[in-house]
Each structure stands twice: as C-alpha cells, then as structure tokens.
Image: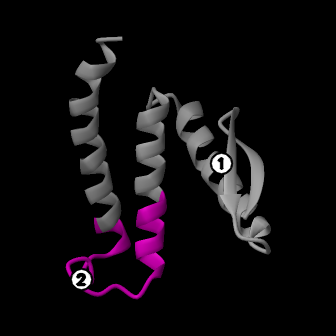
C-alpha cells in the first residue's frame, strides 16, 4: 500500500491506495474537492459534514444517471433524480439546522 497526502477543501488527509492506483485516487480527490468547494462557495450549505453529504449525493446522482439503471431508479429521468436529491437536501437542512445551532 502507498500513502498519499492530499487536500480536500484545504484540509490535509493521508490516504492509502494500492500501487498503480495513485493517479485514479488523485483524480477522485480533485473531483470531490471541486464538488465540495463549489458547494461551500455557493454559500447555501455550511459545515464540512453537510457539504460532504451534499457532495456525496451529487456524485451518487451523477453515477446513477450514467449507469444502466436497474431496480427502483430505472424509470426515473435525470430531472426526477435531481428533484429527489433536492428533496433530500431539504430534509437534511431541516434535520441538521437544529444541530448546527448547538455549536
């Protein structure tokens, strides 16, 4: 295993990967960092945990939109998936806002 030092939203992380997979991991880190920074910079989402969840949902939706869907999402259009994600954002906002006020 190889250890890589990376940065996501300015925070350092040491990640392990198999030899030969460094490039893929670095690309994944850059992609995730871009998603998270865009969410942070838009100002609609505060808190690293919330930004990470929203970025994960966005990446998952992208993945599902290009993957040959089977199962419960197979009949959904990209617009419908995006609408479902927005609904999840609303639920998460409602659930996490009271927690943020505690800190």
| Mark 1 surroundings within 10 Å by alpha-carbon count, few (fewer than 14), some (14 through 19), many (20 or more) | some
Q: Is residue 68 magenta?
A: yes
Number of the label disc, if any, that sits on residue 34: 1
Picture coordinates of residue 54 (x, y %)? Answer: 42, 46
Secondary element at tag 1:
helix
Apparent side of residue 11 relative to residue 70 in the rendered image (left or right)? right
Q: Residue at x 33, y 19 (%)?
A: 100
Q: Earlier in the sequence, mark 2 or mark 1?
A: 1
Marker disc for residue 8: none
Quarter where residue 64 is shown: bottom left
| Near-viewer residue (65 or 20) | 20
Instruction: Specify the quadrant of the image occupied by residue 61.
Output: bottom left
Q: Looking at the rendering, in which quadrant would you find the C terminus?
A: top left
Left or right of 32: which side holds 64?
left
For this view, does 100 lie left or right of residue 37? Answer: left
For the residues marked 2 and 1, what is the alpha-carbon distance in whole angstroms? 30 Å
The colouring scheme, among rainbow, by chain, secondary structure or one colour, is one colour
Instruction: Identify the residue shown where x is 23% and y is 20%.
Output: 98
Label 2 secondary element: loop
Residue extending farthest to the front is: 1
Q: Position of residue 39 (x, y in %)?
A: 53, 39
- Of marks 2 and 1, the one in the foreground: 1
Residue 25 lies within the magenta run: no
x, y percentage for residue 12? 70, 36
The residue indicated by pointer 2 is 75
Residue at the (32%, 75%) spot, across then down: 77
Q: Which residues are magenta?
A: 59-80
Give the vertical position of 26 relative to 67 (above or below): above
Q: Tell me the residue at 72%/69% (across/down).
A: 24
Question: Closer to the camera, 40 or 27?
Answer: 27
Q: Nearer the viewer, residue 93 or 3?
A: 3
């Amino acid at each position: 295993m190889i250890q890589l030092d990376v940065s996501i939203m300015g925070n350092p992380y040491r990640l392990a990967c198999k030899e030969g997979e460094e490039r893929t991991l670095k690309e994944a880190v850059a992609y995730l960092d871009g998603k998270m920074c865009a969410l942070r910079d838009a100002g609609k989402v505060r808190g690293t945990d919330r930004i990470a969840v929203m970025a994960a949902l966005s990446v998952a939706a992208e993945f599902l939109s290009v993957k040959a869907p089977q199962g419960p999402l197979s009949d959904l259009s990209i617009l419908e998936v995006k609408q479902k994600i927005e609904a999840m954002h609303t639920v998460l906002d409602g659930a996490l806002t009271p927690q943020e006020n505690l800190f």
